[in-house]
Amino acid sequence: MTHADNGLAGGGRVQLDSLLGMLDEALERLATAREFAKPAKLPRLLDIARRVLLQDGGCAALEERAQRLEEAGVFLGSDWASPHILQPSLTTYALQSQDAATVVIEVLSELRMLAVARGEYLHPQLAAEQAHHFLTQVLAINLSMLFTPPSEAERASQGRLVPIPRALLRHLAERIGYEHIIDRLIDEIWRMLQQRPIQVDDIKRMVTQIAICRANPDIDLGGSGQGAERLVSSLYGPTQGCREDPGLSVYRQRLESMDRAALQSEATGFARAMHDTGLVSPYHPVLLRHLLEHGDHLLAEALGLSATGRDCMFCYHELVRELIRRAVYPETSQAIYGLALMLERGILYQPPVAPAIWRQLGLSLSDWSRRRLVAAYGDAVSPAARLLEGVLCMLGLPLGVGQGNNPTCQSARALSMWAYNDPDYLLQMVVWAARDDEIVMHFEGQSISSRESVAGVAVELPMDLDPVSLIVVPHLDRIYAEMGRRCVGREGDPHRWVNPEFHGWWAGRGFSINVDVATGQMVDLDGFLRHFYACYHPYYNGNQPLIHPQPAGVAITDSAARFVGWHAISVLRVALDPAGVMRVYFFNPNNDSGQDWGDGVKVSTAGNGERFGESSLPFAQFASRLYIFHYDPLESGELAAVDQDELDQVIGYIQRSWGAERLPPGGLQAGRQPSA
């Protein structure tokens, strides 16, 4: 080990100032180099940065240079160049890499996030809240590295790189505040769980890390973490029979000696924990499979069913039992929650649904589908069982579908809409994709095959998806892109024609947009808003509730109200919230729908009358971010006589955010009328 590498280990410490002088020189050379020459300049800079990170104060010094480092091109051409799409769950692998360049670039990326979160760097792609949220998750996922020394395995694999990840995590924790890490993490977990996402693996990993830290006598959490008990117990000890987390085999033996009263108590405890949190303990499948031999009533108790769910289960008890046998394992425990909520919805009473699920049980998966499921989830259970878990979760939680940072929001919205509104159609899509490796849809009378349409919106096939999305989204993405290509040359936005054909007959053929596609300027904003009020606001549409979810498009803004991009959502309903405020309740196909869109427009996911998975905003705030909506042209009626004060309020939100530079020279009334 050289003197330069001794760093934190002591002895012959190289002065930080000297290293920073070298770093600044290398940084200047990188910044002034032409783009094609930057890769040759980068290795020297990364090597100096590695040596800086081994010094006390090294992280702080690099945090100060975060903006300059990015603007010089440190992340150019890599995944780190787009911080808004980075996944916290992948940081562990990068920080524990044996490749020095990977570790250093990951650390520089986290320090950039910290500079953004602290307001030191106003990033064009990332809001401070997003960066803070990302770092909270990074700390959560890497708690073991933060609180425990490196193992011998880490020392052997990473060698002189070992101190760097821990120095970073300590620096992040000090900046955010040690005393708040666990508490904020717990609050964050509960906030996410209120949205009832289908994908909960990251949440379970966070809860597991909290449990490990709480159980380790060498880790002092101070007064924090008091609210973790419910989360930890819901996974690792929700009932008397598994209170001390004895292991699955021990718990299985205990069940054999329990009488009916004890089994009843176990069933009730598991059901309560599952419905309280949305998380399912790996012990729960052990009980459920045991109860297959003890009658339907205990099964219904273990699923936590109401009278509606019980009636549905008793009517289709053979199907339910077969679903438990084929889909419910400790590795697929969330299937239990999906099954329970599917029964509560009563959708098995729709004539096509039960036969379609029987077909799913006997489905032969294609080689491509099997390989994709194994690549994403491993082979602990069969790919068929994994897909069946995904089907149950999507039918039970139709608003829990998330596409994360993948550019497939249209496909995610379609899957949610079908699960919500037309479950047998969703099941048909799953069969076509999983068995045939092909989906065929129609656009204006002409068939479109996903097999023949090779290019989709997504550049790469996304892997961080639920099992159904993992199999179906690649096909839908190609079909959606092909529908768009068939609209090339038509005037206006292609969603006018694509959305009704892609999503279903219930999507209104009427279409209104407030942006001129050719120029990006706003057109007839007053008419657009009055039209939206007339179609959707109960006070102006004759108190007509929304019957089917409707596709819509919103202009997403960050917490500084800056325009980020266009996003597909679906409007679910419009109603008064508990405080008497008229709100739009909508589905946002994102893994986290609680977002700050700036200027006081904060999307709510709980506490304002939302059902699981819904987002909501007051009507005027929602209208201020809307740029596309669909409607039934035969029911649109007159333009609403909306009070001018309310319209001015909406227009004010637009002017202070994404519309600031889109208003035409002639003012708000200028431009063409929106097409219907």
Image (spheres, grey):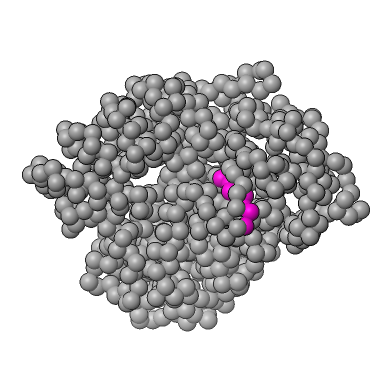
- Which sits in the foreground, 518 or 584? 584
Q: Residue at x 44, y 22 (%)?
A: 351
Is residue 186 in sight in this rendering? yes
Q: Quadrant of the C terminus?
A: top right
In the rendered image, residue 275, in percent from the top left (x then y), is placed at 35, 49
Q: Residue at x 38, y 33 (%)?
A: 387
Horizontally, residue 4 falls left or right of residue 265, namely right
- Which sits in the foreground, 563 or 66? 563
Q: Which segment did they paint magenta?
A: 581-587
User: Relative to 438, is 195 above or below?
Assistant: below
In the rendered image, residue 36, in percent from the top left (x then y), is placed at 66, 52
User: Mostly what secondary structure, the magenta segment?
Assistant: strand
Q: Residue at x 50, y 62 (%)?
A: 133
Q: Residue at x 80, y 49 (%)?
A: 641
User: Relative to 14, is 604 above or below?
Assistant: above
Q: Furthest-left residue in view? A: 257
In the rendered image, residue 73, in percent from the top left (x then y), is placed at 62, 60
- Which sits in the foreground, 512 or 331? 512
Q: Furthest-front residue in view? A: 542
Horizontally, residue 433 falls left or right of residue 516, namely left
Is residue 367 in sight in this rendering? no
Q: Quadrant of residue 301?
A: top left
Q: Quadrant of the N terminus?
A: bottom left
In the rendered image, residue 362, in percent from the top left (x then y), is placed at 34, 21
